[in-house]
Image (spheres, helix red, strand yellow):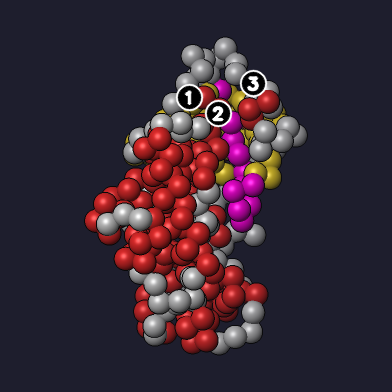
Amino acid sequence: MIEAGADRRAVDSVLRAVDMAEARLGEPIGVEDMAEAACYSPYYFSRLFAQATGHSPYDYLMRRRVASAAELLIGGRASIIEIALDCGFEAPDSFTRAFRRCFGVPPSEARKTGCYPRAIARTRIERTQVEAMLAAPPPAPEATKEADAVIMGSWSELPWADPLHGSLPSARAPRLILVERGGSLEAKRTFIGQATEPRPPGAEADIPPAYPLSASLVSGGRRARFRIEGGYERLDFVVEYAYRSWLPLSGRTKAPSYDIIEEGGDGRLALVLPLIEDSGSIPCPS
């Protein structure tokens, strides 16, 4: 928790602006209105808000409106024009551009397929995330490219959401924790083990199939590696930042199915996101 008076005031100011924006997502509000709610000048507020959320005020507001509209597209019967106007967009064209910018597809395609990439949709930022961002924002991820590998280990039924209470205790030897995800940040399964040598050419027949009981195939490719300072207590914060702030603004698309946590023998952690090139079409998870 942030205890310094100035920092607490900054947190409260950002959250006042967020509360106002959430209450008026469908109205024609802008950065000036959010700054007024925060009791700061627009210039100072914009810098503070970006530090606290990972987005500019305008970008945050736009992404929240698009996320709200996406739910109406999938779950409702209103026309795209009606949804655009109800969610604060002045015209259908501006809504279509914003939707494509956020999700890589037009709203008409999202309605047709019945899905959109919820994992990167900007959800309402909460106090704990604002406090953590202002106190110690995560460093920018490292970009790597890695070969295929196999993790030898076992599936765990331990609850992924409770790593702080011993669910994923540290090990002396380095290991990888493979976390399968569905359409949200909630993990479906967790695989704990150690990586073998990369798959040699021509040895595909000897490699276990993906996700068996005792091994898990991890395809090579581009990665974004987020170093986690502070151990598992910071893990949830870094995951939230990676999905809700970094990914939407990075121009990259998260590869489906899993994330990787690298746990070194010295206790150092890293969240590793498999990436695919942004092709303008984002697959929806099953």
Residue occupying image coordinates x 43% and y 39%: 8
Which mark sits nearer the N-terminus, 1 or 3?
Answer: 3
- x and y percent of residue 232 in the render? 56, 27
Which circle marks residue 230 in the picture? 1
Type of amino acid under label 1: Gly
Q: Which residue is mark 3?
A: 169
Image coordinates for residue 87, horizontal then vertical, percent: 49, 76
Question: In the rendered view of the protein, which quadrant contains the C terminus?
Answer: bottom right
Q: Work out whether residue 256 can be spotted.
A: yes
Residue at the image position 40 percent from the left and 77 percent from the top: 28
Disc number lying in front (1 or 3): 1
Segment colored magenta: 175-186
> Which residue corresponds to mark 2?
233
- The span from disc 2 to disc 1 (Cα, nearest Å) is 6 Å
User: How far across and how far down the image is residue 101, in percent?
Assistant: 38, 67
Residue 105's image quarter? bottom left
**Tags 1 and 3 touching, CB below 8 Å:** no
Q: Is residue 148 visible?
A: no
Q: Is residue 12 above or below residue 267?
A: below
Name of the residue lying farthest toward the left:
43
- Three-letter amino acid code at the position of disc 2: Glu
Of circles 2 and 3, the one toward us is 2
- Residue shown at 64% from the left, 21% from the top: 169
